[in-house]
Amino acid sequence: MPEMTFDVRWPDGSVDRCYSPSLVMHDHLTDGASYTVDDFVSRSVSALDTASERVRAKYGFACTSAMATSEQIVSRSARFAGDAVVTVAHMHPPLDTPDTAGRRSQGVS
């Protein structure tokens, strides 16, 4: 199961590196896009729940790292107004790599 990281630039300019055990983040967030804090949290938590469930389906247990990332995002977001802007500064691996595209088209991510 391919994993990924994504860098989040918060409204105060700070950047957090976040982890997902699945490329599913690409289905919910776009590299370089900006979202309101509330929208970003909703999208991220949903994607990380899906990622954790993919781990459960494959290995028989939920992904504690995905849950920790979700908690990190929710906790950090509480410092900002819901309509403040968060930017997805970088997603790695990017969606368009041949390796990523091949795995996603096969439903492996």
Image (cartoon, rainbow, N blue to C red):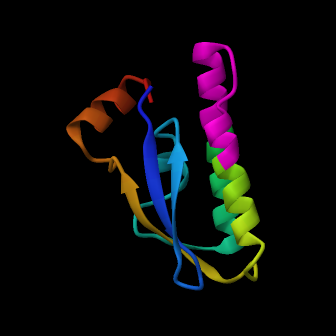
Q: How many marks?
A: 0
Q: Nearer the viewer, residue 19 or 87?
A: 19
Q: Please identify the residue farthest to the left as the structure is shown.
A: 98
Vertically, is 109 above or below 97? above
- Looking at the image, which residue is at 74% across and 61% down? 74
Vertically, is 78 above or below 104? below
- Looking at the image, which residue is at 43% across and 24% down? 108
- Left or right: 7 with respect to 99? right
Magenta segment: 51-68
- Looking at the image, which residue is at 73% across and 80% down? 80
Q: Can you say which quadrant of the picture contains the N terminus?
A: top left
- Left or right: 99 with respect to 79? left
Image coordinates of residue 100 in percent, x first then y, are: 31, 37
Residue 62 in sight: yes
Vertically, is 36 above or below 107? below
Residue 46 in sight: no
Image coordinates of residue 83 in percent, x first then y, are: 71, 82
Image coordinates of residue 65 in percent, x first then y, are: 62, 39
Q: Residue 78 sits in which quadrant?
A: bottom right
- Quick check: is 11 in the magenta stretch? no
- Quick check: is 61 in the magenta stretch? yes
- Looking at the image, which residue is at 67% across and 35% down? 64
Image coordinates of residue 102 in percent, x first then y, are: 28, 29
The secondary structure that dominates the magenta segment is helix
Q: Nearer the viewer, residue 26 or 18?
A: 18
Q: Nearer the viewer, residue 73 or 38?
A: 73
Vertically, is 68 above or below 83? above
Q: Can you say which quadrant of the picture contains the C terminus?
A: top left
